[in-house]
Amino acid sequence: MSHLIHLVNARLVDGDQLVSKSLWIDSIAGVFIPPPLPDPASSVAAATSIDLQGRIVSPGFIDLQINGAYGFDFSEDATEEVEGKSYTQRYRDVRRKLIATGTTSFLPTMTSQLPQRYHRNLPLLGPSKSRDPFDGAESLGAHCEGPFFAHNRMGVHLPDAIISSGKTSEPTHVFETYGMNNLFDESYSFDGSISSNVRMITMAPERPGALDTITELSQKGIVMCIGHMAADYKQARAGIEVGATMITHLYNQMNPLHHRGPGPLGILGGAGDINPETEAKILGEGTSNTRPYFGIIADGHHVHPASVRLAHLMHPDGLILVTDALLLLGDEDGTIDWLTRRLTKKGISVTLEGTDIIAGSCVTLLQCINNFRKWTGASIPATLQAVTSRPAAVLKLGHVKGTLQAGADADFVVLSENHVPGQPASDLVVDEVWNFGTKVFDRNTS
Amino acid sequence: MSHLIHLVNARLVDGDQLVSKSLWIDSIAGVFIPPPLPDPASSVAAATSIDLQGRIVSPGFIDLQINGAYGFDFSEDATEEVEGKSYTQRYRDVRRKLIATGTTSFLPTMTSQLPQRYHRNLPLLGPSKSRDPFDGAESLGAHCEGPFFAHNRMGVHLPDAIISSGKTSEPTHVFETYGMNNLFDESYSFDGSISSNVRMITMAPERPGALDTITELSQKGIVMCIGHMAADYKQARAGIEVGATMITHLYNQMNPLHHRGPGPLGILGGAGDINPETEAKILGEGTSNTRPYFGIIADGHHVHPASVRLAHLMHPDGLILVTDALLLLGDEDGTIDWLTRRLTKKGISVTLEGTDIIAGSCVTLLQCINNFRKWTGASIPATLQAVTSRPAAVLKLGHVKGTLQAGADADFVVLSENHVPGQPASDLVVDEVWNFGTKVFDRNTS
């Protein structure tokens, strides 16, 4: 098999269109390449051609918020061995299982922890950097979800961790908690190739010092999200205005939309109020820049389908599907230990044992995609943007991830459609997953 | 002056465009006419031509929910004289003042009352039928807002009236309350020319019997709205599915949008849930038909500008601006008697004396239009649809009202723009109001 691969008879996701086009891959470089000149003398003649029989090719899925899967939690004690396997080995096993679901890159997400846990785990969860296709799903850096949350919006996060985060969210305090070395490193640059271990942070914007921290870290290239917050409309808006670009799992762990107190949802339409100057700003040039991206959990449990549909209508270009999956993803129903607590999985629901308190999800990004299409009627390409180009854009990696354009990493998924009678939309099925130009999953041979 | 009038150099509202076109009017018939053939022998040569100097011509505004104005309340005792004037005389005075604001037709709206009050007032509030331009704003029939409301969502409506409405919302009970003669009359027909005194009814869909009443009355051509309700998502949806076509003052007096209990707002995206059959229905053909119109009060007090913006994003084609004005519209700040209570006006706020309980508004439709443009950035023609063609469509009068097309009543407004420095949108100013082809208001001579 040649290192040059020519995928023919494929329908490619191109913006919100599906276009019949062929695709060229250099499997040694692991990237998409432009169509070579047809030169019989060249290796092009010997390129391996693969007929995809009209199936859909999407960039690999990107999950910006996943706390664990297949029995492994990214926040667990990295010093412990389980069944003779180190944290690093277990983490690699999970990445290999995860990629078979179509998720080729992700942000391993840590829930609220004590500083020591961040100092230990973040170096292990930073960008994979390896371009070995068989290393499984690629980490693009860690997502620190917490601990700088509102006390009444911490969900199932460890209260100790949040309390131990101290009185303020000031930069010095935040830096100590995660560890300077995890936030900044010498290879840091503005071109999107930031390689600090932490890629994304979710914090409540209304806490003392939070706006200073959001300002400083966003300027340094870390993606700042607002979430798990008690913020009202203006406080949420302030977070966006100083540099946060995303709202973490919209609706969950924030104030709801009230007609006289719109809360964080209010800023989806543009961060405006009745002040003429501000209105001029938000309705004038660059308005869209002040409309945040937002993650949403379309598992059928966290958010009602009609509310997902409304969020999509309110800001379709901002919507990003995230799983918020916990270690129970891929497990049987039942109750298991999770850090210092116990979780019960029943179907699509994960709750703290003996309560109805929701504790993350247990769905794959593919399930969210299929739910979303049924609930919104969004087209296949429009839906796939919510797990490919849009999350890549949030990470400022749109040139290398979440795209099929020449020069980008050849991480992609071959999808077929399963038409279920009576269902308003087909289910997408992952037939093949390719990582850095090499096929790493094939439904027919797995 | 000829009875043929030719308006030249005007910008006409045409869908969501402003088009430079001329407009022909037959002021005797009181309708717009097609451009006559230029025949020197004919009266056309003698047509009066009026240069509008590039100003905007909009169909006259239609207010679907206005309880009173200028000290007069449509629900007050029709047997009483005030300062020597009968109810009928006071009602006519108000219509003449109202038309100067650009509102050429409206639904006089009665708050929740005892049956006797409906029986007395509704015959006086029915369709004006008069085509005398100087009769003021034209009633297109009454809007009965109540009394069949949820007890915890009645706002400032008379509790007695709601309690006296009895235990159910069954058809027989509803018919008795308003009076059969006010709901149906022999000249009733399906072509939109329904001339029953009651044109619109707002009721809570979750009350016993309500769905039967909505079914029966909507089939008979009365526009049924759901509002002042305790309805959850499915109950609101049920109201729409049996024939209600509009939600009364969205956000106010209904359950808010909660992510796991979307409530009435949930149906703005289409009346769907996760049931595949229903999804197929709402996402398939005719989906838009199952998305209700909704009134919204853009007075800056009932609903936060950001929430108005989100409602506009959720369902722009369903949005209708209503004033929900009370008798304090046009009055000074202060406290006055209102039926059995007292109301305090302070700026744009009207509340029950000594409380912060909102009691209707005191704004004109023009003020709502200007607010809406600032808050949403909607274009002038797109905004004007929310007070012209859209309310006309709800009333099934799109062929005669809310349009400038030939054959329609020549009710229109000449608008100029007032550009306020620092403001994101200009303010529209009513220069002239025409009613049935005759100018009845001119800002320069009033």
Image (cartoon, coloured by chain):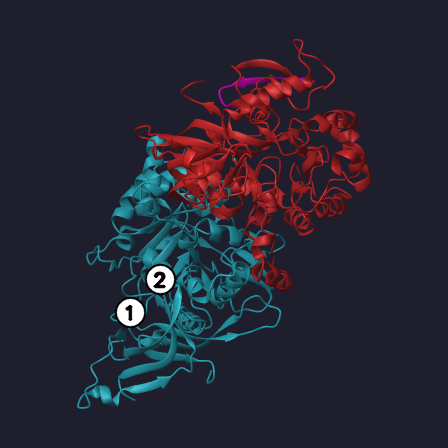
Chain colours: A cyan, B red
Left or right: A47, with B110 as reference point: left
Q: Which residues are magenta?
A: B341-348
User: Against B242, is B63 above or below?
Assistant: above
Q: Position of residue A130 (x, y in %)?
A: 28, 71
Name the residue that disc number 2 marks.
A389
User: Against A9, is B67 above or below?
Assistant: above
Q: Position of residue A246 (x, y in %)?
A: 38, 49
Tell me the quarter of the picture where residue A380 sits. bottom left
- Give me the residue at 25% from left, 58% from top: A192
Tell which subunit mark 2 falls on: A
User: Against B161, is B354 above or below?
Assistant: above
- Magenta residue check for A284: no
Q: Position of residue A422 (x, y in %)?
A: 62, 69
Q: Earlier in the sequence, mark 1 or mark 2?
A: 2
Mark 1 → mark 2, Cα distance in angstroms: 11 Å
Tell me the quarter of the picture where residue B355 sits. top right
Name the residue that disc number 1 marks.
A405
